[in-house]
Image: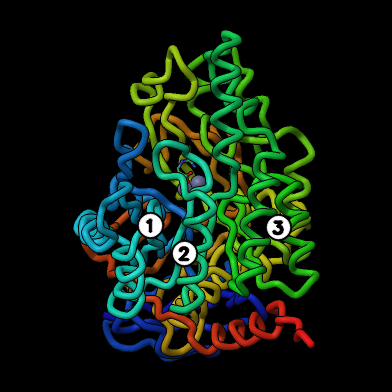
Amino acid sequence: MSVLIKGGTVVTDSDTYRADVLCANGTVQAIGKDLDVPAGCEIIDASGQYVMPGGIDPHTHMQLPFMGTVASEDFYTGTAAALAGGTTSIIDFVIPSPGQSLLDAFETWQGWAEKAATDYAFHVAITWWDDSVRRDMETLVREHGVNSFKHFMAYKGAIMATDDILVESFSRCLELGAVPTVHAENGELVYHLQQKLLAEGMTGPEAHPLSRPPQVEGEAASRAIRIAGTLGAPIYLVHVSTKDAVDEIAYARQQGQPVYGECLAGHLVLDDSVYRNPDWGQAAAHVMSPPFRPEGHQEALWHGLQAGNLQTTATDHCCFCADQKAMGKEDFTKIPNGTAGVEDRMAVLWDEGVNTGKLSINDFVALTSTNTARIFNLYPRKGAVQVGSDADLVVWDPNGTRTISAATHHQNIDFNIFEGKTVRGIPRHTVSQGKWVWRDGELRAERGAGRYLERPAYPGVFELLERRAELNAPKAVPRH
Ligand code: URP
Ligand code: ZN
Ligand code: ZN
């Protein structure tokens, strides 16, 4: 079965040119002007449209068991919604309970993900530490293609990684050639502020952002970056939401430290006024961590993307419906944290980024796909339009419009944080593994079609970093 995308403009992170793209057997077979149409080939008319690598969302939580409930979106519904939004791969998180074997948790998540409609990979969270964790990290890297490990610096009493764990795990990542990643919020401060606010009688969602002010993120970002820098390890910060954290990243990068940052479509466009909505359900639906921020931080995130200090965009897609959010009716700390967006990320970034002139179309490709593929070692299989790459492509209509709404989205959640927003620039067609899966509004996602993506570690780069760390290590002063 082959598909010819005809008459479009190919856009990569570096180039823009007119060409047809022929996909067969799941990969890109040819790129060129006026390609012949093989017998039986389906044709997608891409005239007036852009042909780009399918999006990669590096941060999703499908069917995550979290805060006493389970995210409503499973690996099938969530990846189907992703395809409708032009995203053709996700990187989800295996999150072992403290004390649980990493390999057992990995197997559980693999089982859940068998129904995925897009290709997928996993980061694995380090939520506790002993020698078995150390060993399992090696098995995951060498035998299961995991090259990134996640550390939650928040969620005290649950999955929080304390400094001793960060030091052990970042060092182990460095030995294995894996990338340590962090959710940067100071969990002790969050816990302290939560108890204080509750004691003062603040029990509603308006207290959520007050319990997690920007400096809580700035402190954790600085600490994680400095721990990584001391050890000579690279570091990737997920869902960077504040100017405080962007400044820490920018400073470290200026010193030559390999630091990477991700930001969420939601954090780029919403502010903390959502928590002051007098309707409890509306405010609670926005409870996620880090929270939406006061005005001004959004501009800093855009500047971070423009300056190259933030390299990727994600969603942290983690869906909880109104009945689940209601678990925190009497106590804001019990509202399950999470919001959706896997279907909307690309259109929101295009509308707010490209249409406003903040980003070029090549920046858009880099930020929605290619940079993630490079950082997490999926490139050029993913994130590219190249002969031999997977035929995961999106045909982007820069003039198409859509009004985002929970009433029409494909995500399995009864709320949309972008409700009512009309975006100009939409995925007109999505091709996954060479098959036409989103066709001008018709979704043909196939349950179980997604494949697990192995992501090899980076021994070469890490050997270099280790040598650099040795050179920078304090030397013993000779005694005479
Ligand atoms: O609120 C969020 N972000 N929920 C999912 C877990 C996490 O912190 O990424
Ligand atoms: Zn997080
Ligand atoms: Zn997350």
Crowd class of label 1 (few under 14; some 14 to 19; many from 20; radius 10 Å): some
Q: Secondary structure at mark 2?
A: helix
**Which picture quadrant has residue 283?**
top right
Amino acid type of the residue tagged 3 in the rendering:
Val
Going 67% across and 25% down the picture, which residue do you hit? 273
Q: Quadrant of the N terminus?
A: bottom left
Residue in the picture at 37% in, 83% down: 27
Q: For disc 2, does the CB lie below 8 Å from ligand 2?
A: no
* SS assignment at label 3: helix
Tell me residue 324's x, y (percent): 35, 25
Residue 83 placement (x, y as % from top left): 39, 57
Where residue 402 appears, as percent x and y from the top left, is: 54, 44
**Are the two marked residues, 1 and 2, in contact with CB atoms closer than 8 angstroms?**
yes
Residue denoted by label 1 = 129
Q: Residue furthest front?
A: 480
Residue 93, given in percent of the width and then of the height, sits at 38, 55
